[in-house]
Image: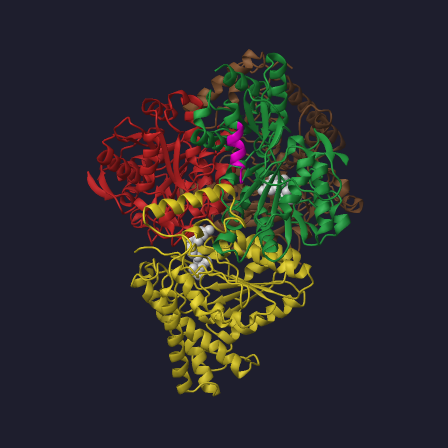
Chain colours: A brown, B green, C red, D yellow
């Protein structure tokens, strides 16, 4: 069995050589994990109270998203995330309000309220590729994004993240194969959280590990403790370094656990054993880095409280702002199908807006709708 | 008889088939212990064991490819694709393989397989949990395409599909999974494929529809009856391929005014074929343009999905247009 | 001006685009040293190097997925799918991703990519080297679908497609690759997308067609002119999506008699949309049923392919039917 | 680098332990290879002279097809071959006339002249799955075929064959993954003939070998000299034994070389180096087994001549018979689309037959057409 890199043990004790990191970077990682944990929690509550339609639990996997994102350079790199990667955007300072705009699908949502919640899409502060529902499609796309940078002689790298279930998808096979053949600057990050909805890892694949799948494509693989943010940061940083140097792609398996349901529509008690949850609860990634930073004197109890309080305030403000915005205008049903509305869509749009206007339902441009 | 929702009728149909025929198997993502994301396969693994109802890895290509192999070797697989929107990774296996196996092997190898999948909007699913892709399959010779609109038909058509010697796409209107209940006979019965159902009588005009649009159209013609005293016929096609063309042409001929309704995008949608059939064979009986009420030619939105999907009011407008022409 | 075959015009178009724009790339199976199985990419690797024209592994999903990534990050990829019949493994990337990227990202990410692929029968290719799948793509909002029928249009439409900000399916009629030659301007020029071409004048009836059916229809109307002295109009649609609907409706209105021709299967084929548009908007001008001449609703055969595909005689029969109605 | 199993060296000398095989079996293998080589040659000539439309060169790879087929039991096993596997059918005594019926696409072709040449499909003497043009689709199908046997408690095994290019296909990924997860009795045989049309192996995949791709699915892999029919026979036999015993699938990489073009439409001189061909010509699989059998006294020069003469006679007779048969009837354009012709196809068939009858072209049932 391949060994799994770990730097901080579940108790927060250092067991491996930690990457040299500035105090601010460590705090930024910690803060991103705190915000992720608390934003996730708020979103689940908003869904239960019917204020947003859907969300995807992130609890338990924060170290994977944040550790990996921290290894990327916003100035030149791209990220093609999965839908369970809130922490990646939060680490890179995507505004929480922008994220909540997507959760609400309101008039200022980047996706114009066309996508379900959690299907984020950002261009700034760095490119976060539009998240798709179909699993695995973004892997070959990430390879293309990376190849484009190489062809232009740039040294950017594309990080793409997906789940254990995603390794069975078409995109995993074509993505890793093309990346291997063209030696593309891509980092493939598998968030192995043990489950694909109700499908456990051993029903997903018979392979010894996920990391070993890289062999099939001549792509080096490595396995890391996904609940150890410093370990994740280190392996992703090393993979990015190789990619930038033109040494090609890497497949990283970050071993973690999905502590919540698959989504707000899922009831995991039907299939996840309480023991498994208990076992993983003891390895909580947030508690682990907190203990470590307290031990290192980077954090003190006051700072812990302050950061949590700031996070809650920021999240609260973002929700308040997003909730106050109107729904998108009726014309957004038609725009962005093409760069310009073709004649048949102009006709359909005009008919649609006129039809609902006569029904007294919805005025296009203003995006106002009677409740 | 028992009073079931449409999804319960599907579940009942699967259990009925599995009890009667050892070779009937169910496979797909999360169809086992979880019972499927809509609970259509609830209880199957418990009753029939995980050799007959089993979870698969996350690969639609694998689900359908393996299903074809099972079918070619004596089994009767019923494959579930979690959402119709996610069927495209299996498009090659469906279109190139399942649909053409009998033809290309001169009947030596055949694919008696059913592909069940929930389709359509109405659950705030956005681009990828709302699509209606029936036209892709209806254009594929070698496939059969079935869309139930009532619990009774769901079970009867499913049992007929499982018994069918050819591959059947069984598209389930997820918007109706729990929104309607109906009487469903116990045990085994079938509803013949390639037969339509007349939902409401009338000859002022005829509305052709299927799946989740059937109750929408029924509401529309009821209001038309109230408001204008005109009786409009609603015909539920039930099987889109092979379509009972004679029935469609008879209804069109006898009513002279036609409205075609579906939630899929209009351009090259299934409704186009209905209009074309009529315009080719009975145009001389038409007393008005053949109207289509459909989704728009855009991807499927989320927040505004109810402005995308046809509703009773949009169907009424079209009926009035053909009546007043 | 030079006199080129259709496939030479495609090759010329690719070279012209690659000379003018560094970001234009060509990828696909065997497009490199071999120059593509039809030689459409001959000489590209030699002239532009294997960073700009490169062979890929045997994965259409990879070709289109990588193409989308290249397009989203500033490149103008032209992907070749060796035969349209082999595009289905990439159906998910095309339908779920390329077609919906702009919409779902609110225009933040776009896919200016061209997918070139030879389609259609006539080369004794049997089930899997003969298909005409245009209807699958024409039903997919977010895609553009282009089908040239002359060397001049092939180059001009290809250059317009490469310049287009959205994904374009560029379907090349392989039956015409070498069977026709025509004058092709040197250097860069474009033929606007979404414009039709009137091939023959006349108003006794109008025949709508595209791709390899254009010369077939032209032959048919010439014979009709000889035999019956009636002038029938042939309209080459050139762009199937977005279709120039106004032009189609004008031609239908002014002729009153319509024949729609394609080699793809009839049921839910592209012709159905043309019939439906006409039946919905200008039915009152129709003096005859709207006739369709198409392939049959079966897979594509081999030995008997010439009995499957529409030919001039079959088109003539339909024209006579609508003229004599 | 994984070593490659070899039993007979290029000179025909034994270098490994040969499987214990009856004299007749050895002769049957040899005979099948001779017939394959000569039938292939005749088909290429028939295509050049315009008597058949197309063919696929089999020269150089005969040992892979024949060695593998010889390991299968016609009474209980299935084979899902590639289009470059003439030898599998020939070994199992599919009649050459039946094969030529498909090459000609005549009225007695199992595929009713619907498929291109070489797309065979046989039920007897054992199931040879209908060959498809789309690459890789038959791999998951083979897994399903095998799973069906297991579910019925039968001990049959399904052998499926594909090329090096096929390893990039969807079907390779889903087929091996499902086979691994369900431990299906399948033998995956990759005929690594170095080329996928004009794509060389190193542009197809960056993996060290093809055999190693099994690791990604928990499927044991093994590499064998594909020009050594006894070595191929042995590794396939061992894989079949494991599969029958319920020990699951195996991935076999048979290393060989496509000595001709990809197909009769291809000009390999555009991309295959003469040196590569020369190098492999020295390893010819047919010459190798012949030398070996001569050395073992299983063959003598007279027998060699007799077998070749018999083969030519049999092939000549099959071609003569197939060529004499009429084209399929016009109704075959419509039949087998479904078990029964639906109404719309009955109408289309009746219209079609009537239309061409009035044109004096083709009478349905009799299948006679004027030239
Ligand atoms: C092609 C496709 N098939 C099925 C689905 C339905 N689905 C959504 S998420 C999911 C499981 C994904 O599991 P994994 O890749 O491990 O990611 P995780 O949810 O665990 O983060 C499935 C089956 C889908 N979105 N796309
Ligand atoms: C899905 C698909 N894409 C492309 C093709 C065109 N094609 C036919 S054979 C071939 C190469 C196959 O190479 P390999 O798998 O190594 O088999 P070989 O021909 O070498 O035996 C290609 C690309 C196809 N048949 N199917
Ligand atoms: Mg998972
Ligand atoms: Mg090969």
- Report the number of discs: 0
Q: Position of residue D183 (x, y in %)?
A: 65, 59
Chief secondary structure of the magenta span?
A: helix
Task: Tell me the residue at 52%/22% (across/down).
Answer: A332
Q: Position of residue C263 (x, y in %)?
A: 38, 41
Q: Position of residue D171 (x, y in %)?
A: 53, 53
Q: Nearer the viewer, residue C124 or B232?
A: B232
Q: Nearer the viewer, residue D171 or D87?
A: D87
Q: Classify the position of ligand 2 by quadrant: top left, top right, bottom left or bottom right.
A: bottom left
**Left or right side of D99 for B77:** right
Question: Is D267 drawn above or below residue D93 in the view shown?
Answer: above
Residue D270 forms part of the magenta stretch: no
Q: Nearer the viewer, residue D316 or C78?
A: D316
Q: Quadrant of the N terminus of chain B?
A: top right
Question: Is D86 drawn above or below residue C54 in the view shown?
Answer: below
Residue B249 forms part of the magenta stretch: yes
- Which quadrant of the figure has residue A315? top right
Instruction: State whether residue D218 appears in this view.
Output: yes
**Left or right side of A197 for B96:** left
Instruction: State whether residue D202 appears in this view.
Output: no
Q: Position of residue D370 (x, y in %)?
A: 31, 55
User: Which residue range is magenta in the image?
Assistant: B242-251
Task: Tell me the residue at 49%/52% (across/down).
Answer: B103
């Amino acid at each position: 069995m391949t060994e799994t890199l770990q730097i901080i043990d579940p108790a927060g004790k250092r067991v491996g050589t930690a990457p040299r990191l500035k105090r601010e970077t460590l705090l930024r990682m910690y803060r991103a994990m705190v915000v992720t944990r608390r934003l996730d929690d708020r979103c689940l509550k908003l869904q239960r109270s019917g204020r947003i339609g859907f969300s995807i639990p992130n609890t338990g996997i924060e170290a994977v998203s944040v550790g990996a994102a921290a290894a990327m350079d916003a100035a030149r790199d791209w990220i093609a995330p999965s839908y369970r990667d809130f922490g990646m955007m939060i680490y890179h300072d995507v505004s929480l309000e922008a994220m909540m705009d997507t959760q609400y699908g309101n008039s200022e949502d980047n996706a114009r309220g066309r996508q379900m919640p959690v299907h984020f899409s950002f261009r700034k502060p760095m490119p976060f590729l539009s998240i798709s529902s179909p699993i695995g499609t973004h892997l070959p796309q990430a390879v293309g994004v990376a190849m484009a940078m190489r062809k232009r002689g740039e040294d950017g790298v594309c990080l793409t993240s997906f789940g254990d279930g995603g390794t069975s998808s078409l995109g995993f096979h074509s993505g890793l194969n093309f990346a291997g053949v063209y030696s593309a600057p891509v980092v493939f990050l598998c968030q192995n959280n043990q489950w694909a909805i109700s499908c456990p890892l051993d029903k997903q694949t018979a392979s010894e590990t996920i990391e070993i799948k890289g062999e099939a494509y001549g792509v080096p693989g490595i396995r890391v403790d996904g609940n150890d943010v410093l370990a994740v940061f280190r392996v992703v940083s090393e993979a990015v370094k190789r990619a930038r140097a033109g040494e090609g792609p890497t497949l990283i398996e970050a071993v973690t656990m999905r502590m919540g349901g698959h989504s707000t529509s899922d009831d995991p008690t039907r299939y996840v054993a309480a023991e498994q949850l208990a076992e993983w609860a003891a390895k909580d990634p947030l508690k682990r880095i907190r203990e470590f930073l307290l031990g290192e004197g980077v954090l003190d109890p006051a700072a812990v409280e302050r950061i949590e309080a700031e996070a809650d305030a920021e999240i609260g403000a973002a929700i308040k702002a997003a909730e106050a915005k109107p729904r998108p205008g009726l014309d957004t049903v038609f725009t962005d199908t093409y760069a310009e509305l073709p004649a048949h869509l102009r006709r359909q749009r005009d008919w649609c807006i006129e039809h609902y206007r006569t029904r007294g339902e919805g005025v296009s441009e203003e995006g106002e709708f009677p409740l | 008889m028992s009073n079931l929702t449409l999804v319960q009728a599907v579940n009942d149909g699967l259990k009925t088939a599995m009890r009667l025929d050892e070779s009937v198997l169910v496979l797909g993502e999360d169809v086992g212990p979880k019972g499927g994301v809509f609970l259509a396969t609830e209880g199957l693994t418990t009753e029939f064991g995980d050799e007959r109802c089993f979870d698969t890895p996350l690969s639609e290509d694998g689900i359908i490819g393996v299903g074809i192999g099972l079918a070619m070797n004596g089994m009767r697989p019923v494959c579930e694709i979690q959402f119709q929107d996610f069927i495209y990774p299996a498009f090659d296996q469906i279109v190139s393989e399942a649909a053409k196996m009998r033809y290309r092997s001169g009947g030596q190898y055949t694919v008696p397989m059913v592909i069940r999948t929930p389709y359509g909007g109405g659950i705030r699913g956005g681009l990828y949990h709302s699509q209606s892709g029936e036209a892709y399959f209806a254009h594929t010779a070698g496939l059969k395409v079935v869309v139930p609109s009532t619990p009774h038909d769901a079970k009867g058509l499913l049992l007929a599909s499982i018994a069918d010697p050819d591959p059947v796409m069984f598209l389930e209107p997820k918007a109706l999974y729990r929104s309607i209940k109906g009487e469903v006979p116990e045990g085994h019965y079938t509803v013949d494929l390639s037969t339509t159902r007349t939902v409401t009588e009338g000859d002022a005009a005829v509305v052709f529809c299927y799946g989740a649009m059937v109750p929408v159209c029924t509401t529309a013609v009821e209001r038309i009856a109230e408001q204008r005293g005109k009786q409009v016929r609603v015909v539920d096609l039930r099987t889109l391929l092979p379509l009972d063309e004679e029935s469609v042409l008879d209804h069109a001929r006898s009513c002279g005014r036609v409205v075609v309704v579906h939630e899929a995008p209009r351009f090259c949608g299934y409704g186009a074929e209905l209009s074309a059939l009529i315009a080719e064979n009975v145009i001389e009986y038409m007393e008005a343009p053949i109207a289509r009420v459909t989704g728009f030619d855009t991807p499927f939105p989320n927040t505004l999905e109810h402005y995308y999907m046809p509703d009773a009011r949009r169907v009424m407008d079209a009926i009035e247009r053909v009546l007043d022409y």
